[in-house]
Amino acid sequence: MDLGIAGRKAIVCASSRGLGKACARALAEAGCDVVVNGRDSARLDATAQEIAKATGVKVTAVAADLSTPEGQAKLLAACPDPDILVNNNGGPPLRDFRELTRQQMLDGVIANMVVGIELIQKTIGSMTERRFGRIVNITSGSVKMPLAGLDLSSGARAGLTAFLAGVARTVADKNVTINHILPGAFDTDRLQGTLKKAADAKGVTIEEAAKQRAAGIPARRFGQPEEFGAACAFLCSAHAGYITGQNLLIDGGTFNGAF
Ligand SMILES: NC(=O)c1ccc[n+]([C@@H]2O[C@H](COP(=O)([O-])OP(=O)(O)OC[C@H]3O[C@@H](n4cnc5c(N)ncnc54)[C@H](OP(=O)(O)O)[C@@H]3O)[C@@H](O)[C@H]2O)c1
């Protein structure tokens, strides 16, 4: 399918690896010029080169910490008027909620709620003026289904979702959409990190921990980042203008509910 977005400008936050990278790659394959981002500039540059070589589009690498105003300014200076914004950021580490300090809670809310809203504040005006905008927020399946130790992540992302539910309805008539994709277990570095922790806690190998985790997923496997990127690119496509304010759960059937 031609997604109808060739030549569009996309910012994909936190995209030097994992789900963000897969979204940047899928948008580049659809012909968008993309801005990729991460804090580690060596890894980011390698990703930018890889995507540019594979797709032939313009790929701009912006090494910056999104959680800071300076980092956001640097990102937006590279692409002040994006047509497409994919909000993503690192997630907080697994932690018992009793151990969270006030500052850690505030940092978590900033990273997984406030940053996304700030970037939307700064880009949505030009999207509505141009009568085209696609905003996708990478949140988590934990917004719908709690995960022990990820309470801060779940709460901050649910806050983002609720905040933007109203905003989405105010820009729908300008062909600007705001949607969320909720990943279940996807095979990225972050998942490998949580599998290592689980393996250490249970005294088993990482392979065994992975087998046990996958056994609890109806699809009996982890998601591949490319599958995630393809869904994101569709939500950013010209064809998805009537889809807004939605939460797309991609979890191999893990959330056990009819709706
Ligand atoms: N994978 C899963 O199964 C899964 C499930 C549910 C939710 N999620 C959530 O989905 C998001 C992406 O997950 P992932 O698995 O792709 O993670 P990942 O493999 O750890 O990749 C995270 C990306 O974010 C960048 N990043 C982190 N903090 C940043 C910051 N402050 N500023 C700019 N870039 C930053 C990282 O680059 P640098 O480290 O170089 O900055 C990297 O490119 C996370 O919020 C995660 O919690 C993932």
Image: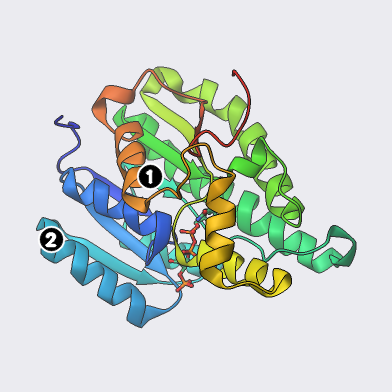
Q: Is residue 28 left or right of residue 233?
A: left
Disc 2 target residue: 54
Q: Position of residue 105 (x, y in %)?
A: 78, 60
Q: Examine the image and state in which quarter residue 101 appears.
A: bottom right
The amino acid type, in three-letter code, at marker 2 is: Ala
Which residue is at the front of the view, 146 or 119?
146
Give the quadrant of the N terminus. Answer: top left
Identify the element where label 2 is drawn: helix
Which residue is at the front of the view, 103 or 141?
141
Query: Can you say whether 17 is above or below 12 in the image?
Result: below
Instruction: Please tell me which residue is depicted at 30% across the width and 31% down the height of the picture.
Output: 130
The answer as to whether callout 2 falls within 8 Å of ligand 1 is no
Marks 1 and 2 sit apart, C-alpha to C-alpha, by 18 Å
Q: Position of residue 174 (x, y in %)?
A: 38, 22
The answer as to whether callout 1 falls within 8 Å of ligand 1 is no
Disc 1 target residue: 228
